[in-house]
Image (cartoon, rainbow, N blue to C red):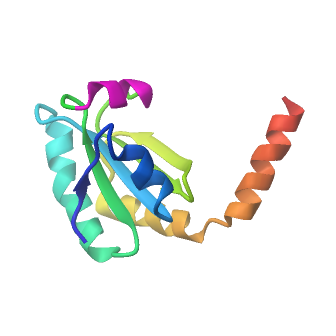
Amino acid sequence: MSTQELTVENFEETVTGNDIVLVDWWADWCGPCKMFAPVYEKAAEQHADVVFGKVDTEAQQALAAGAQITSIPTIMAFKEGMLVFRQSGALPARDLDSVIEQVKALDMDDVRARMEQQASQA
């Protein structure tokens, strides 16, 4: 599966309407973003069960601001609509694959229970 462009119009629907969504926040002028792009594309081809989105931070400034993107590339992973991973900086292919496998393995009932527990202690 190839990557898809995410915009303010389709971001929320994409994240909430799919089991696992990875998002690459990038810009055309960003050298590390350009170096990471082929790694991200290859991962998208290898993991057909994951939606791979890309947000052009220049074209989607309001979306990037809402997501508090201050450094690019930034990678986010959502599972069942919940943000479960966020990291700035390009990832090597093996690290990106590791993140994907870890996200796939997450027990979301356990994640939600831990978040509820943390919220009750705050």
Coordinates of residue 57 in the picture (x, y in percent): 25, 32
Q: Quadrant of residue 7?
A: top left
Q: Quick check: 79 above or below 76?
A: below
The residue at the point 51 percent across, 48 percent down is: 85
Res. 70 visible in picture: no
- 84 drawn magenta: no
**Furthest residue toward right:** 121
* Residue found 14% across the figure and 45% down from its top: 34
Residue found at x 21% / y 62%: 41
Q: Is the magenta stretch mostly helix, strand or loop?
A: helix
Q: Position of residue 67 (x, y in %)?
A: 43, 31
Q: Answer whether residue 67 is visible to the viewer in this image.
A: yes
Q: Give the range drawn in magenta.
A: 60-68
Say if 1 sits above or below 8 in the image. below
> In the image, is 121 to the left or to the right of 3?
right
Is residue 9 shown above or below 62?
below
Q: In this view, does 61 lie above or below 45?
A: above
User: Residue 47's x, y, as percent?
Assistant: 35, 74
Q: For this view, does 66 lie left or right of residue 58?
A: right
Instruction: Please provide percent x and percent y for residue 69.
Output: 38, 29
Q: Quadrant of the N terminus?
A: bottom left
Q: Which residue is drawn at 42% across and 58% down?
A: 21
Q: Which of 42 and 66 is in front in this view?
A: 66
Asked if residue 64 is among those painted magenta in the image, a careful observer would answer yes
Q: In this view, does 31 lie to the left or right of 52?
A: left
The number of numbered discs placed on residues in the rendered structure image is 0
